[in-house]
Amino acid sequence: MYDFCKSYVRIISRINKGIGILAMYLVLAMMGILLYSSFSRGIGSSPLWVIEMAQFVMAAYYTLGGGYSLQMDAHVRMDVFYSRWSPRTQAVTDAFTVLCLIVYLVLLIYGGVSSSIYALETGQKNYSAWGPYMAPVKLIMTFGMLLMLLQVLASLFQHVAEAVGRPFELSELMQEREGMV
């Protein structure tokens, strides 16, 4: 079981790293869309789709990059007592909070799948002048939430292994975390 969990953590970490790095470039796409909007307003004609498309790209950016952010421990943490605790106490606390996050993500995915199916079946369009189909952005966001859930499960495995005194030796991941600080 230990080897399975270690392999799972390694595979999910690689997947989230690859998708997270690709998602980083969506910021450039969003900047291009907004720059186009600025130039088109300057000449007097602002397309209807630009702001809404920028919102869709931003939603894809933060949902697809969420798993990588969790992997790199780049999320916000309020540290009042945490840094004073032993590594084992930190791991036990992290395992508990990860369980809460799993419940939250499962509910988000359930809603995302339901909403995506509805959008696909009905051809749902947004209520705006542009009226784009909603299924693509809903599917991307649901996929991003699934990636976050898979990464959270990997984090849970890591915290439990640390709490029982058998942490995973994932040298690639640790080297990258040290490089990100």
Image (tube, grey):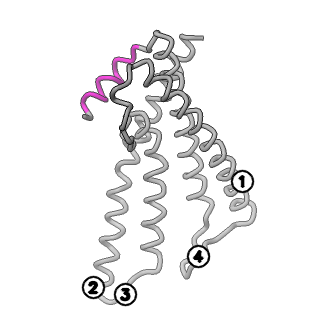
Graded by Cα atoms within 10 Å as few (under 14), some (14 to 19) or many (20 or more), the crowding at tag 3 reads: few
At 42% from the left edge and 33% from the top edge, which residue is drawn? 71
**Viewer-side label of 2, 1:** 1
Residue under label 2: 42
Residue under label 3: 45
Give, as a single range, the part of the protein colored magenta.
Answer: 169-179
Q: Give the mark nearest the N terminus, 2 or 1.
A: 2
SS at mark 2?
Answer: helix
The circle drawn on residue 131 is 4
Q: Could you say which is closer to the camera, residue 176 or residue 22? A: 176
SS at mark 4?
Answer: loop
SS at mark 1?
Answer: helix
| Residue 11, horizontal then vertical, whole percent | 49, 25
At 73% from the left edge and 60% from the top edge, which residue is drawn? 118
Q: Give the residue type at disc 3.
A: Ser
The circle drawn on residue 114 is 1
Dominant SS of magenta comes to helix
Mark 4 and mark 1 in contact (Cβ < 8 Å)? Answer: no
The circle drawn on residue 38 is none
At 75% from the left edge and 61% from the top edge, which residue is drawn? 121
